Amino acid sequence: MRVFVAYVPSGRRRVCPATGSATAPGRSRYHLNIIPKVIDMNEHGIQRDSASWQFFVRTSFAVSVIALTIGIYFLPVIAWIKGYLAMGSLFAIGSSFTLAKTVRDEHEAKKLINKISEVKTERILKDFERD
């Protein structure tokens, strides 16, 4: 699904649900200096990586692990040193997965908190405008 997103100078995105155009209610796109951008999203509104990027990332990871394994195997040292290097490498790889997941989860949590905060702010502004 392709979504047309507009970036307004205030930093808020506006999309007209009826037309999919990048305009704010009651204003023209030229008046607000809106820059339209197309983003590929799935049915849940989450931006996804392209298939070619996913292939590149997975291939790069596989090549690096294979090169590291071959390098440790052909290292001219005794077996227990090779084992130590292999265990350390596996621990580093596992820790990098854990770190990446933790950073991603923290980012997702901040996005949710920001959405909730934005909704509360909009509700307060609407209440203020009514009075």
Image (cartoon, helix red, strand yellow):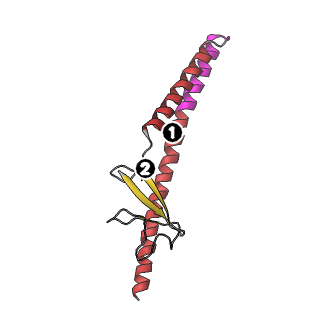
Query: Residue 4: percent from the left, percent from the top?
Result: 41, 58
Q: State the residue position of label 1.
A: 98
Residue at 55% in and 36% down: 96
Give 78 or 55, whichever is nearer the viewer: 55
Q: Identify residue type, mark 2.
A: Gln
Q: Could you tell me residue 25's position as x and y percent?
A: 40, 74
| Location of residue 28 with respect to 45 vertically, above or below | below
> Mark 2 against mark 1, which lies toward the viewer?
2
126 or 26, which is in the foreground?
26
Say which element carries label 2.
loop
Does 77 appear in magenta? Answer: yes
Q: Place residue 38 in its image quadrant.
A: bottom left
Is 31 colored magenta in this rendering? no
| Left or right for 56, reference 123 | right
Which residue, as the protein is rendered here, is positioned at the far front?
30
- Frontmost residue, 103 versus 21: 21
Q: Which mark is residue 47?
A: 2
Q: What's the magenta region? A: 76-93
Q: Which mark is first along the chain, 1 or 2?
A: 2
